[in-house]
C-alpha cells in the first residue's frame, strides 16, 4: 500500500506569456512565502511535488505552449513524479470549461482574479496587508511594476478584456510603497506595465494620472531608471512627455503598440485613431523628447488588408524610422469582433508581409545603430554570456530590444551595476563597446 509522503510540499510556479504574468506569479509566490510555504520558480532540477502553471491565452502559439506545458506536468503526475497540478492565468480564465473536459487530470483550474481561491487549495491564507510584497523572478537589478489590471479598449482583434476584465488602476500610494520595497531589495530599473498605461488613473482619479505617478516614483531613492511599456495611442496624456524630458530617471523610451496605419483598417480594428492623428502623435513625441526611442508593434494580414493597404503601412514604416519594431501575423481569436470578419489574407501572404517589414526595420535599425558608434552611453549590465558582458542602454528594454556586448576577456564589469560604455561597432540589433 502506498503511504502518503511526510516530505514537506514544494510548490513550483511555472510562468508563461507576458511580463504581466511574471508579475502575477511573483505576487502569488510572495503570498506563499508569507505563509511559510516552500516555493520555487521554474525549478529545473527539483521540480516540486505541487505545480502551479500560470498560462497565457493571447494568440495561437501562446495557447499551444500553455497546453503543451499543462500536458507535460499532467504526464509527470501520472508517472507519480508530481502530486498536484493546478492551472491559473489567461488560458484558464478564457477556456476553463473546455480545459476541464479535455484535461481532467488537472486538479483544479483558476482564472485571473482567483488568487485567494488558489491560495486556499495550496493551504495558504490571502494576506491583504502584503502590499508590494513579491518574490521577484527577474534579475536582481530590474523588476516589473504592474500599475493597472485589465482593459476598457474595444480593439476588435484582442481577447485581453475577455481574460483580464475591465481596467482597474492601482492607487499611486500603493505603487510608491511597492517601489520603495523593490528599491530596498536593490532594484535599479523599474519597468511600468499595464494593458494600457495611457488610461491609468481615469477610473480612480477621473483624470489620466500617469505623469503624476511618474513624479512620485522618481523621488524613490535607489531607482535610477523608469521605463514605460504598452501605452495606447488614443488619448495619450502629453504631460507625460514633459516628465520624460525633464526627469533623468525616466528613460527616453516608450513602447506604444500602433498596430496599423491605414484608416479603414484602424476603423475596423476600433483603434479610435487615424493615419493623420497617429503620425502627428509620433511627431509630437519626437519634438518634445528629441532623444526618445519609440518601440511599436504592428499587425499584418488583418481581414481586408489589401495589397494597397499593406503598401501604405510599408511606406509609413520606411518614413517613420522607428527605433524598435515588431510585427505579428493576424490570427482570429474566438469571441472578438474581428473573428466575425472573413480571414481573407492567406497565411503565406501574412508571413511574406511580416518578413518584408522586418527586413525594412532591420535596415533602419542598422543605420540608427551606426550613428551610435563613437558615442558613450550609460549601460546597465544584465548578465555575463560566454565571452561577453551583456548590457542595455536606456533605449532598450530587456528581452525585446538591442543589447550592448563588452568583451569579457579584456574587461571586467559587475552584473547589475551601471557602466559607462563607448560604442566601438554595431550590427542591426547589437552594439559592441568598451568601458571608459
Image: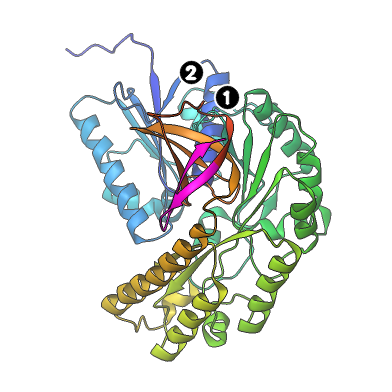
Query: Which residue is identified by label 1?
Result: 125
Depth check: 54 or 324 in front?
A: 324
**162 lies left or right of 72:** right
Q: What residue is shown at x 56% (from left), y 70% (from top)? A: 258
Q: Is residue 332 visible?
A: no
Query: Which residue is identified by label 2?
Result: 37
**277 lies left or right of 302:** right
- Classed neighbour count for the residue bearing mark 1: other residues with Cα under 10 Å, few (<14), some (14–19), many (≥20): some
Depth check: 2 or 313 in front?
A: 313
Quadrant in which the N terminus appears:
top left
In the image, is residue 10 above or below residue 60?
Answer: above
- Circles 2 and 1, Cβ within 8 Å, touching? The answer is no
In the picture, residue 74 is in which quadrant? top left
Q: Position of residue 40 (x, y in %)?
A: 42, 24
Considering the numbered disc 1 on the image, is that residue within a helix, a strand or a loop? Answer: loop
Considering the numbered disc 2 on the image, is that residue within a helix, a strand or a loop? Answer: loop
Q: Which mark is residue 22?
A: none
Residue 427: say if magenta. yes
Question: Of marks 2 and 1, which one's residue comes earlier in the chain?
Answer: 2
Depth check: 393 or 306 in front?
A: 393
Magenta-colored span: 422-436
Amino acid at each position: 500500500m502506498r503511504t502518503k509522503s511526510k516530505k514537506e510540499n514544494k510548490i513550483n510556479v511555472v510562468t508563461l506569456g507576458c511580463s504581466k504574468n511574471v508579475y502575477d506569479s511573483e505576487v502569488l509566490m510572495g503570498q506563499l512565502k508569507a505563509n511559510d510555504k516552500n516555493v520555487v520558480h521554474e525549478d529545473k532540477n527539483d521540480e516540486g511535488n505541487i505545480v502551479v502553471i500560470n498560462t497565457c491565452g493571447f494568440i495561437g502559439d501562446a495557447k499551444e505552449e500553455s497546453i503543451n506545458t499543462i500536458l507535460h506536468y499532467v504526464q509527470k503526475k501520472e508517472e507519480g513524479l508530481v502530486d498536484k497540478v493546478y492551472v491559473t492565468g489567461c488560458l484558464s480564465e478564457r477556456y476553463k470549461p473546455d480545459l476541464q473536459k479535455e484535461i481532467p487530470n488537472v486538479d483544479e483550474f483558476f482564472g485571473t482574479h482567483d488568487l485567494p481561491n488558489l491560495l486556499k487549495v495550496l493551504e495558504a491564507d490571502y494576506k491583504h496587508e502584503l502590499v508590494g510584497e513579491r518574490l521577484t523572478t527577474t534579475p536582481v537589478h530590474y523588476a516589473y511594476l504592474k500599475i493597472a489590471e485589465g482593459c476598457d479598449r474595444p480593439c476588435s482583434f484582442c481577447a485581453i478584456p475577455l481574460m483580464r476584465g475591465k481596467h482597474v488602476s492601482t492607487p499611486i500610494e500603493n505603487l510608491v510603497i511597492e517601489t520603495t520595497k523593490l528599491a530596498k531589495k536593490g532594484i535599479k530599473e523599474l519597468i511600468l506595465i499595464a494593458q494600457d498605461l495611457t488610461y491609468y488613473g481615469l477610473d480612480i482619479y477621473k483624470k489620466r494620472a500617469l505623469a503624476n505617478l511618474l513624479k512620485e516614483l522618481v523621488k524613490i531613492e535607489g531607482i535610477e531608471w523608469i521605463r514605460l511599456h504598452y501605452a495606447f495611442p488614443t488619448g495619450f496624456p502629453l504631460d507625460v512627455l514633459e516628465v520624460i524630458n525633464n526627469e533623468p530617471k525616466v528613460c527616453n523610451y516608450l513602447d506604444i503598440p500602433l498596430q496599423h496605419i491605414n484608416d479603414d483598417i484602424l476603423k475596423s480594428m476600433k483603434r479610435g485613431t487615424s493615419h493623420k492623428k497617429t503620425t502627428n502623435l509620433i511627431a509630437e513625441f519626437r519634438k518634445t523628447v528629441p532623444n526618445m526611442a519609440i518601440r511599436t508593434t504592428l499587425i499584418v494580414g488583418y481581414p481586408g488588408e489589401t495589397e494597397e493597404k499593406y503598401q501604405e503601412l510599408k511606406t509609413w514604416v520606411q518614413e517613420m524610422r522607428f527605433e524598435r519594431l515588431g510585427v505579428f501575423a493576424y490570427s482570429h481569436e474566438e469571441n472578438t469582433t474581428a473573428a466575425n470578419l472573413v480571414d481573407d489574407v492567406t497565411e503565406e501572404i501574412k508571413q511574406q508581409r511580416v518578413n518584408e517589414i522586418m527586413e525594412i526595420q532591420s535596415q533602419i535599425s542598422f543605420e540608427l545603430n551606426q550613428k551610435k558608434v563613437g558615442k558613450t552611453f550609460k549601460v546597465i549590465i544584465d548578465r555575463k554570456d560566454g565571452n561577453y558582458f551583456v548590457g542595455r542602454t536606456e533605449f532598450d528594454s530587456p528581452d525585446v530590444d538591442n543589447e550592448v556586448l563588452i568583451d569579457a576577456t579584456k574587461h571586467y564589469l559587475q552584473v547589475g551595476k551601471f557602466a559607462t560604455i563607448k560604442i566601438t561597432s554595431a550590427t542591426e540589433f547589437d552594439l559592441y563597446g568598451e568601458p571608459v
